Image: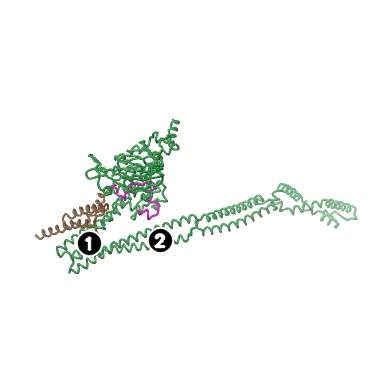
Chain colours: A green, B brown
């Protein structure tokens, strides 16, 4: 299916807009360029309303006004809102074109409105005219299945719902998209209906069994077994869903626990604070002791020795000299005194007082004694000084006072720093405690563990019901074999037996096809998504890229793996650009594998992207889509102009006149609220759409030139 | 945007090979039946129909083919 044209009248900001879409294979891209608040999302909504009706509107259209806000501000007025879409569908005889017209009248007055029922008309467009098609809703549904709308009409943010939000919802959305596109739903329905056919046939066997007791028994048994099957399937699915939900809850609780623990565990923080406070007291004591030691150093001998080192050195030299001269210690007087008491001098001469010579000698000794006595006081002091000040005069060992001073100073500094650090640490812990959410870590742990336990129980049930289902299938097969044998006795039985065989074969095919779709086809989607995604983000797993691969699990979850096969949470571990690239890769892969030919209509898909990723996403989206319609802002286009040159078959620009004069250069000259359309492409602008930013850029280029 | 039943049919026909060929031409009949069932389901999704009866009738048609062919093959063998 391809969109050819849309015409929108009186739909909110869009008073009268007509757009033709590019359909050529080589240039399949249509770009609607518009700044924010210029009607991109409104046009996307109008297109969806035209194709699908009120269900495409917010809250299914309840309290959602369609007519322009400036319509009938004073008097009550009727406004006709309409969207006309031309599209083309492939048929065996070639493409067939249709025009779908949806219209409704709104009665408005000021902010109030009333809307009647919307009408739909469908026309076939052929060479001879536009004949209307009866029962248009029934006719268009095969062309426009409602469940495919979410996949093919999306925006950059909404597409993220495939990988963001709660895990159960993510999986449901992914499963929904896959079921719709791969046709799982229709095959499941066919299987359920075929089972009913089998059950009805079995009832027929029972009714016809008559006197054949064994046939009656086996057909009754089969009925009972077949009746059990849907219930067992329901219970199995319920257990599986419960398990997934509980695992989801457990994961959520675990995430909350990790967040809380990252912010801090209150008990651990209290213990840390106590430790810091105790450390601070010890550091304070150390600092005090160091301060005292510091003060004592100023009273120490060492300081004196350090300060008087020079005079001490001189004194020591003098005293040493005196010592060497024998003047220290002073021992002359006692010797001389002692000699006067002797009759002979030490030289052997007489010291007899009666002898004149002896008397003369005695007088000389006495004179020596007297002379010595005169200097004795000084000598005594010098001797005391020599011996008493030996410690002072001894050379200083080690670094001396300055060394001790440095050591104590450093010790004091260290203690002060430790005290300050611990104080800061204590304050930081206090701040953390104050900022802690009112979360009970133990409670969170208990909740997570409880969910895990419950998930384990649910898993047990899931396995149990899978076993019951398996037994049920085996019992049915055995009973069917027996019934077949018993039915072969007569013509009528053989006919019913043939019917049962066909129904059985049909069931088998449908059941196996479902399995294939859920495994092989799903795997193909995953493989294709992985290739596209890695190409889009420029990741090469062989070159140590952070992202190694992406896949879809059998329970419909999109998962990403990093290096060493570490699982990454796409919603948390990928950046914005990669998240968008992943979801767009998923949509493109699903479209490709399902071979559903449909336009991909995406609003602002390249937001949050830049450089290589932006260009690759655009290039691959155009390459992989049968038709691509993008609503892009000017900044999304920037850097991708050459790709648009090549791929864009049609480009339009929407302008909101209310943006004059702040954004627009020229006054559009209109007073009503309504978006204006022009054919300006991604490299061009006209008087109507020229923006101040473009004017500045062109002026800068001119100045540079 | 229309569903691609060709793709679904491809998968279904792929599974057809695993079904025993109960008589000459049986698999061709089943292939046609699969297309009819798919068509019936699509119609039922758009406008509710008695799809079980439709499928039952289609099953019956193939079953009668199977029964007749078997009878014929049995007769041929007897001759």
Q: Which residues are magenta?
A: A143-172
Residue sitting nearer the eye, A56 or A617: A56
- Percent across and percent down for residue A78 are 35, 44
Callout 2 and callout 1 share a chain = yes
Looking at the figure, which quarter contains the N terminus of chain A?
Answer: top left
Q: Chain of mark 1?
A: A
State which quadrant residue A290 falls in.
bottom right
* Label 2: how many Cα within 10 Å (few below 14, some 14–19, many 20+): many
The magenta stretch spans residue A214: no
Residue at disc 1, secondary structure: helix
Cα separation between marks 2 and 1: 43 Å
- Residue occupying the point 11% across, 59% down: B75
Looking at the figure, which quarter contains the C terminus of chain A?
Answer: top left
- Percent across and percent down for residue A513 are 26, 55
Q: Chain of mark 2?
A: A
Q: Viewed as shown, does residue A420 lie left or right of B9? A: right
Which residue lies under the disc numbered 1?
A200
* In the depicted structure, whether residue A251 falls above or below residue A607: below
* In the depicted structure, whether residue A536 falls above or below residue A273: above
Can you tell which of label 2 and label 1 is closer to the viewer? 1
Residue sitting nearer the eye, A173 or A265: A173
Q: Are marks 2 and 1 in contact (CB under 8 Å)?
A: no
Which residue lies under the disc numbered 2?
A452
- Percent across and percent down for residue A610 are 41, 42
* Label 1: how many Cα within 10 Å (few below 14, some 14–19, many 20+): some
Residue at disc 2, secondary structure: helix
């Amino acid at each position: 299916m391809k969109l050819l044209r849309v015409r929108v009248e009186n739909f909110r900001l869009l008073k009268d807009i007509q757009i033709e879409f590019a359909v050529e294979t080589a240039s399949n891209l249509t770009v609607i360029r518009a700044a924010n608040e210029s009607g991109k999302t409104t046009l996307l909504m109008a297109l969806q309303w035209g194709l699908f009706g009120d269900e495409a509107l917010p809250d299914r259209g309840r309290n959602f006004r369609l007519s322009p806000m400036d319509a009938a501000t004073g008097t009550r007025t009727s406004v006709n809102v309409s969207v006309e879409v031309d599209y083309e569908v492939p048929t065996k005889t070639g493409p067939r074109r249709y025009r779908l017209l949806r219209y409704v009248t709104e009665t408005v007055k000021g902010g109030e409105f009333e809307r009647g029922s919307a009408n739909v008309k469908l026309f076939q467009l052929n060479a001879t005219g536009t004949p209307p098609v009866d029962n248009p809703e029934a006719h268009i549904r095969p062309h426009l299945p409602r469940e495919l709308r979410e996949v093919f009409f999306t925006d950059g943010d909404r597409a993220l719902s495939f990988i963001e939000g709660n895990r159960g919802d993510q999986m449901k959305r992914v499963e929904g998209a896959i079921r719709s596109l791969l046709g799982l739903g229709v095959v499941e329905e066919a299987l359920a209906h075929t089972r009913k056919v089998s059950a009805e046939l079995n009832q027929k066997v029972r009714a016809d069994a008559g006197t054949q007791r064994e046939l009656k028994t086996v057909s009754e048994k089969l009925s009972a077994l077949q009746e059990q099957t849907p219930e067992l399937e329901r219970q199995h699915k319920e257990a599986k869903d419960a398990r997934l939900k509980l695992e989801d809850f457990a994961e959520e609780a675990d995430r909350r626990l990790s967040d809380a623990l990252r912010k801090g565990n209150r008990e651990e923080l209290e213990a840390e604070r106590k430790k810091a406070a105790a450390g601070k007291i010890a550091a304070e004591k150390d600092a005090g002791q160091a301060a005292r030691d510091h003060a004592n150093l100023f009273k120490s001998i060492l300081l004196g020795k350090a300060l008087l080192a020079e005079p001490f050195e001189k004194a020591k030299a003098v005293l040493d000299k005196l010592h060497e001269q024998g003047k220290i210690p002073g021992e002359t007087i006692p010797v001389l005194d002692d000699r006067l008491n002797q009759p002979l001098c030490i030289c052997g001469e007489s010291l007899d007082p009666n002898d004149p010579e002896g008397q003369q000698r005695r007088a000389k000794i006495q004179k020596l004694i007297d002379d010595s006595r005169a200097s004795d006081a000084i000598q005594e002091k010098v001797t005391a000084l020599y011996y008493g000040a030996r410690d002072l005069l001894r050379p200083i060992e080690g670094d001396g006072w300055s060394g001790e001073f440095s050591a104590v100073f450093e010790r004091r500094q260290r203690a002060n720093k430790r005290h300050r650090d611990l104080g800061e640490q204590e304050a930081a812990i206090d701040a953390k405690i104050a900022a802690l959410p009112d979360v009970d870590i133990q409670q969170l742990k208990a909740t997570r563990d409880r969910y895990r336990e419950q998930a384990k129980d649910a898993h047990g049930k899931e396995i149990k019901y899978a076993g019951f289902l398996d037994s049920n299938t085996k019992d049915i097969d055995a009973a069917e074999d027996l019934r077949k044998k018993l039915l072969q006795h007569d013509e009528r039985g053989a006919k019913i037996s043939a019917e049962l065989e066909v129904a059985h074969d049909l069931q088998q095919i449908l059941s196996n096809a479902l399995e294939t779709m859920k495994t092989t086809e799903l795997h193909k989607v995953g493989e294709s998504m992985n290739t596209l995604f890695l190409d889009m983000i420029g990741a090469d797993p062989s070159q140590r890229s952070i992202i190694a691969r992406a896949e879809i699990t059998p329970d419909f979850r999109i998962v990403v793996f990093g290096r060493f096969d570490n699982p990454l949470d796409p919603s948390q571990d990928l950046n914005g650009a990669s998240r968008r690239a992943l979801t767009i890769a998923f949509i493109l892969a699903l479209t490709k594998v399902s071979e559903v030919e449909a336009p991909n209509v995406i609003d602002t898909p390249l937001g949050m992207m830049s450089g290589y990723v932006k260009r690759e996403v655009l290039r691959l989206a155009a390459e992989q889509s049968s038709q691509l319609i993008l609503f892009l802002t000017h900044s999304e286009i920037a850097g991708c102009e050459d790709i648009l040159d090549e791929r864009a078959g049609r480009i339009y620009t929407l302008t909101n006149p209310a943006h004059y004069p702040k954004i627009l250069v020229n006054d559009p000259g209109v007073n009503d609220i309504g978006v204006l359309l022009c054919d300006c492409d991604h490299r061009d602008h006209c008087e109507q759409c020229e923006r101040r930013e473009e004017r500045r850029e062109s002026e800068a280029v001119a100045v540079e030139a | 945007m229309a569903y691609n039943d060709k793709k679904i049919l491809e998968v279904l026909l792929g599974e057809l090979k695993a079904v025993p060929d109960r008589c000459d031409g049986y698999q061709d009949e089943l292939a046609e039946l699969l297309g009819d069932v798919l068509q019936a389901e699509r119609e039922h999704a758009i406008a509710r129909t008695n799809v079980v009866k439709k499928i039952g009738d289609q099953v019956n048609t193939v079953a009668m083919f199977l029964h007749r062919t078997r009878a014929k093959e049995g007769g041929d063998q007897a001759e």
